[in-house]
Image (cartoon, grey):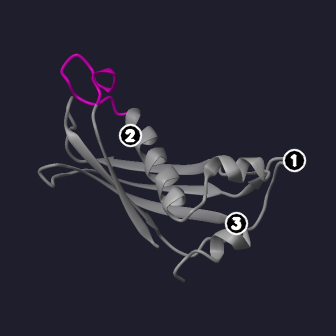
Amino acid sequence: MKDNTISFRVRYGETDQMGVVYHGNYAQYLEMGRVEWLRKLGISYKEMEDNGIILPVINLNIKYLKSAYYDDLIFVRTELKEKPSVRIEFDYMITNEREEILAEANTVLVFMSISKKRPIKCPDYILDKLDF
């Protein structure tokens, strides 16, 4: 599986007084997409942490194209860019129910050992579930 799409409604608390989604919330939307991408593969982020692995973000880029508003139905498409090694890279497209592109984004994360506090290669149990 290389991509996955989630959907949700924008909550009031995610917006400013004009009803527009605050730009900082988009990073959380990307995280929601990544976590669900992993879950669809059969991998729980919590289980990864329990196994001593974390995935800190080392690069985040977001290009904002249109505003999202309170109560909009939002879709976050998360796509794995290439086979992971020590790093894993995702591209994202955030759209609304009118199929307008609201934002395009990219994140790079690194597999890291919690105990050693050092980067490690992508675990085989993740690589085995990918279509590469």
Q: Farthest left residue?
A: 98
Task: Identify the residue under disc 1.
Answer: 115
The residue at 38%/40% (across/down) is: 26
Q: Identify the amino acid type marked 1.
A: Ser
Q: Farthest top residue?
A: 17
Q: In the picture shown, does residue 24 fall above or below 8? A: above
Q: Farthest bottom residue?
A: 132
Task: Identify the residue under disc 3.
Answer: 86
Where does residue 53 sit, x and y in percent of width and height? 75, 53
Q: Which mark sits nearer the N-terminus, 3 or 1?
A: 3
Kindly report the distance in space between the C-alpha atoms of the residues bearing marks 3 and 1. 16 Å
Question: On residue 26, which mark appears?
Answer: 2
- Judged from the image, the secondary structure of the residue bearing numbered disc 3 is loop
Q: Are marks 2 and 3 in contact (CB under 8 Å)?
A: no
Q: Identify the amino acid type marked 3.
A: Val
Q: Which mark sits nearer the N-terminus, 2 or 1?
A: 2
Question: On residue 48, which mark appears?
Answer: none
Q: Quadrant of residue 22?
A: top left
The residue at 48%/59% (across/down) is: 37
- Judged from the image, the secondary structure of the residue bearing numbered disc 1 is loop
Foreground of the two, 40 or 76: 40
Q: Farthest right residue?
A: 116
Kindly report the distance in space between the C-alpha atoms of the residues bearing marks 2 and 3. 25 Å
